[in-house]
Amino acid sequence: MLDAGSWKAAVLDLLGGGWTFARVGPRRHEDWRRDAVAVMTLRAEDPRRWHSLNHAPEVREDRSGIGAPFMGWSPDQLGDSLYEVREASARQLLVALRGEHYRAAGIPDFDGRRDRLFRSSRQVLSRFGPRARYFTNVSEARGNPDVDLLDADTAWECLSVYTTDCGLVAVSDTEVGVFWAFWED
């Protein structure tokens, strides 16, 4: 059973290191993209008041200005950069975000940590229920909802103020979660 403690442990296991972002907000609109933008721009609070992360350092130089790691996208612009994937791909991506270049191959001792990381991934996604929908900015997912995202060698539709970013948006009938990792060269 997922509760505040197991949620926090799973989120920290997956996204606790590096430049990461993990936040959930309420789903208030039929167009979930409006709620995702609210989460990304720090204008939504977790309805359960569970743990969240915003470990992305601010980058100014006219790229941020909103105090959040993401650009101020409109819902339409956001939707043009996200591709729907099924839950198995979403679980893989949450694990891969832990690794260098968003690949499980970049996770130290991945073979020894694999089962635990996938357990954490299942826990995080269980919050959104069996009817949840998942979206990513991984270009390889365009037109392929079953893409293998564990070690994808691809490009990303960057949504942040950083040079590279990769992530997942989870959408249920009541909540929207945003899970992201960033890299700046």
Image (spheres, rainbow, N blue to C red):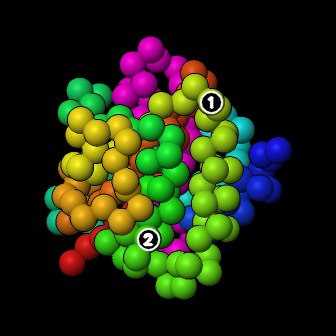
Three-letter amino acid code at the position of disc 2: Ala
Horizontal placement of 118 versus 65: left or right?
right
Mark 1 Cα-neighbour bin, 10 Å: few <14, some 14–19, many ≥20: few
The residue that label 2 is drawn on is: 104
Residue 65 at x, y percent in the picture: 27, 54
Residue 44 visible (yes or no)? no
Horizontal placement of 76 versus 16: left or right?
left
Is 143 or 46 nearer to us in this picture? 143
Residue 1 at x, y percent in the picture: 82, 44
Label 1 secondary element: loop
Q: In the picture shown, does residue 35 fall above or below 155?
A: above
Mark 2 Cα-neighbour bin, 10 Å: few <14, some 14–19, many ≥20: many
Horizontal placement of 98 versus 120: left or right?
left
Q: Magenta includes 146?
A: no
| Mark drawn on residue 130 | 1
Compute the Cα span from label 1 to label 2.
25 Å
**Quadrant location of the C terminus in the rendered image:** bottom left
Is 120 or 31 nearer to us in this picture? 120
| Mark drawn on residue 158 | none
Q: In the picture shown, does residue 107 fall above or below 90?
A: below
Is 41 or 159 nearer to us in this picture? 159
Three-letter amino acid code at the position of disc 1: Pro
Q: Which residues are magenta?
A: 15-41
Residue 141 at x, y percent in the picture: 28, 44
Could you tell me how many numbered marks the image carries?
2
Residue sticking out furthest to the top: 30
Q: What residue is drawn where x is 38% and y is 56%?
A: 149
Q: In the picture shown, does residue 100 fall above or below 177?
A: below
Label 2 secondary element: helix
Q: What residue is drawn where x is 23% and y is 40%?
A: 142
